[in-house]
């Protein structure tokens, strides 16, 4: 069977300017995520970053991508609108999209959601417990009923997203807040998964259960009917 082709997109700015982030992700968050999902049979991952020509998201590159993973934070505004249009069109045509953590404010996520995607936040070393709310869902395969991240940034409700197709995980934070941390959508023929954890100063993407969920989500989001575009427009009466 052909492998699922994953492209991990990272803004890749904090890793260059912040020694704490450098120490946690010496080769960049994209490298850690690509290595993590590549451990799974059937997934082949590569990476692209903001400062590459066309942000590394050329037509050709996207055409050979089954699932795009997106991490961005402080440079959402530098992502070119024509590239956002291009990525959105690919999602509507069937490419999977996994948006991580502060990607909730990325142009591509806000475009596909149609809402502000705003939330509450606090950077204060909260403990986060993620509870599975859709047992048996492929994205939480192998996770059990909950898992814990010892230190994370808090994201709290209300999270201004459309009502999800499925809410797979809900987080509780030691400050008392809760958050819909794993949610799915379909837009056009594309599947979208938003997954909350992953603040850049914490080693969240080295956490085995976080890695497992992202890899599961890649397999879930991969297009299953590639090469079968829908037909639109006028349809004459026909015998068949
Ligand atoms: Zn953060």
Image (cartoon, rainbow, N blue to C red):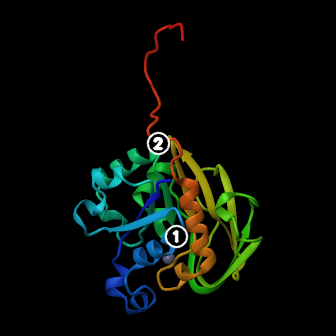
Coordinates of residue 228 in the picture (x, y in percent): 46, 35
Q: Residues within 10 Å of mark 1 (few under 14, many from 20)?
A: many
Left or right of residue 149: residue 226: left
Ligand 1 is within 8 Å of the C-beta of the residue at disc 1:
yes
* Residue displayed at 53% across by 78% down: 205
* Residue displayed at 63% across by 63% down: 182
150 over 198 or under it: above or below: below
SS category of the residue bearing label 1? helix
Left or right of residue 17: residue 135: right
Left or right of residue 110: residue 14: left
Quadrant hosting residue 183:
bottom right
Quadrant hosting residue 53:
bottom left
Q: Between residues 87 and 164, which one lies in front from this camera angle? A: 87
Coordinates of residue 204 in the picture (x, y in percent): 55, 81
Q: Which residue is mark 2?
A: 226
Q: Earlier in the sequence, mark 1 or mark 2?
A: 1
Q: Please report contact status of discs 1 and 2: CB closer than 8 Å, yes or no.
A: no
64 over 55 or under it: above or below: above
Residue 101, numbered circle: 1
Coordinates of residue 127 in the picture (x, y in percent): 67, 84
């Amino acid at each position: 069977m052909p492998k699922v082709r994953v492209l991990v997109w990272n803004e890749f700015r904090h890793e260059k300017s912040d020694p704490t982030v450098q120490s946690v992700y010496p080769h960049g968050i994209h490298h850690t995520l690509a290595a993590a999902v590549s451990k799974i049979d059937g997934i082949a991952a590569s990476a692209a970053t903001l400062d590459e020509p066309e942000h590394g998201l050329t037509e050709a590159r996207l055409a050979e991508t089954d699932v795009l993973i997106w991490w961005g934070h402080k440079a959402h505004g530098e992502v070119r609108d024509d590239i956002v249009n291009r990525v959105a069109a690919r999602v509507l045509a069937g490419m999977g999209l996994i948006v991580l953590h502060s990607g909730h404010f990325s142009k591509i996520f806000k475009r596909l959601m149609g809402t502000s995607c705003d939330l509450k936040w606090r950077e204060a070393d909260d403990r986060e417990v993620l509870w599975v709310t859709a047992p048996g869902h492929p994205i939480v395969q192998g996770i059990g009923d909950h898992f814990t991240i010892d230190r994370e940034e808090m994201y709290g409700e209300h999270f201004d997203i459309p009502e999800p197709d499925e809410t797979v995980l809900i987080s509780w934070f030691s400050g008392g807040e809760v958050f819909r941390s794993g949610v799915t959508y379909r837009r056009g023929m594309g599947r979208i998964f938003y997954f909350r954890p992953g603040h850049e100063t914490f080693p969240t993407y080295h956490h085995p259960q976080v890695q497992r969920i992202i890899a599961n989500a890649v397999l879930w989001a991969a297009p299953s009917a590639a090469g079968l575009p829908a037909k639109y427009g006028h349809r004459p009466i026909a015998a068949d």
